[in-house]
Image (cartoon, rainbow, N blue to C red):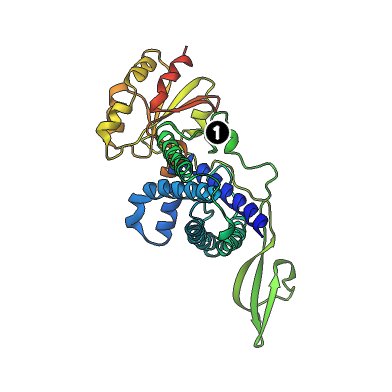
Amino acid sequence: MKQITTIIKWLVGILFIFSGLIKANDPLGLSYKMDEFFEAWHFYALNGFSLLFAVLMNLFEVGLGVALIIGSKSKTVTRLLLALITFFLFLTSYVLFSGKIKTCGCFGDCLPLTPIQTFLKDVILFILIIWLVIFHKYIQPALSALMALFLFGASLFGTMYLQKWVLRNLPILDCLPFAIGKNILAEMQVPQNATPDIYDFVFEYKKNGKLFTFTTQQLPNDLDSSYVFVDRKQILIQKGHNELPVISDFTLQTSSGIDTAQTVLSSSKEYILLFLNDLPVSVRLRRQVNDSLLLFLKNKDFPVLIVSSQPQGNLVQSVVNHYGFPLLTCDATTFKTVARTVPTYLLIHQATIIFKCSYTNANKIFRYVK
């Protein structure tokens, strides 16, 4: 019994640490997923706290995982794990059975799982944690109290520092479709093995008080005014492999509403897409715009395009007016996917992202511009 409990302890602990760290790599992405739940439940007042909740949840997951492996306070830790997995099971079941949210984001964008996979994963974890709650007496401390406290505190500090760092410098592990090395045009293409769904129509008619149902191929030759039309329904005959492109709805619109995405991405020259939006702390953000870099690029006649989902924002307009760079508008969801920090720089050559950075290390672009 003790050996089984020890194995389960390590399995559950490592999984919770991994889950917390993979989401701590991109806490802003987790906050966007939380916003989806808040909107589905009409908890709009909580949207402003989603990033705080995301950071705390990641700390909670990693902390509980480390505490379980250490073995201290096993009764309290296992009960907290049970409460947490019960909450996760509720979320994954909601995603699976409601259909209102596509994925739960349990492992972030780096390890996407289908709703049924995440649900089954949490069911298994729930059973394993129930075992740990029942047999928690077999979980003994592996370290001294002082060493356990130090390791627990270090894990929380490290997770917090990681989240603070990526919120300023972009995720360390970029699993988004706009990562370095990705070709945006290629990601916008429909997969080659994609095939459409095949549908047919079913027609319902009444004749002499009887109801008749026909498919398109079964319509009778004597179909005349003696048949009274009742209804027409579309039915799925064959499910296709109709996967969507990795990047969909990517547009770069001019002020006149013309989409220039294909034209921009087809350019044979290197260029920079500067993703810039306004935030409540716009004065501080103004200092985050690298003036020396933008002035250098302007003097070199290096193509720079400002991309924003808030084209009328004060910060956006001031940068556009000061440097004269063209301004393009993109969808807010696209902006969030590309720019985990504001501003974010994309250096692109023939639709391939060759460098991507936040405002904190924008000076590295100097080495790419001849």
Indicate the secondary structure of the residue bearing disc 1.
Answer: helix
**Which residue is at the far left?**
283
Depth check: give the residue in front, 101 or 119.
119
Q: Is residue 212 above or below residue 244?
A: below
Image quarter where the N terminus lies is: bottom right
Percent x, y of residue 92: 53, 59
Using the image as rendered, state which of residue 95 and residue 149 is in the foreground.
149
Estimate the x, y position of residue 361 in percent, counting from the top left: 41, 24
In the rendered view, tell whether residue 213 sits above or below residue 310.
below
Q: Is residue 253 visible?
A: no
Instruction: Please state which amino acid type lies under the numbered disc 1.
Output: Ile
Q: Position of residue 22 (x, y in %)?
A: 53, 42
* Residue name at image x 65 percent, y 52 percent: 7
Residue 135 in which image quadrant: bottom right
Depth check: give the residue in front, 102 or 127. Answer: 127
Q: Is residue 216 left or right of 293 when viewed as pictured?
A: right
Q: Residue furthest front?
A: 144
Q: Which residue lies under the disc numbered 1?
A: 184
Task: Out of 140 and 128, give the one closest to the viewer.
Answer: 140
What is the quadrant of residue 311 in the picture?
top left
Q: Is residue 99 left or right of residue 243?
A: left
Going 53% across and 47% down the picture, which residue do you hit?
A: 70
Mark 1 Cα shell of 10 Å, populated few (<14), some (14-19), many (≥20): many
Does residue 97 show up? yes
Looking at the picture, how far across and down is residue 141, in whole percent?
Answer: 54, 50
Question: Number of numbered discs present?
Answer: 1
Identified at 55% across, 65% down, the residue is 97
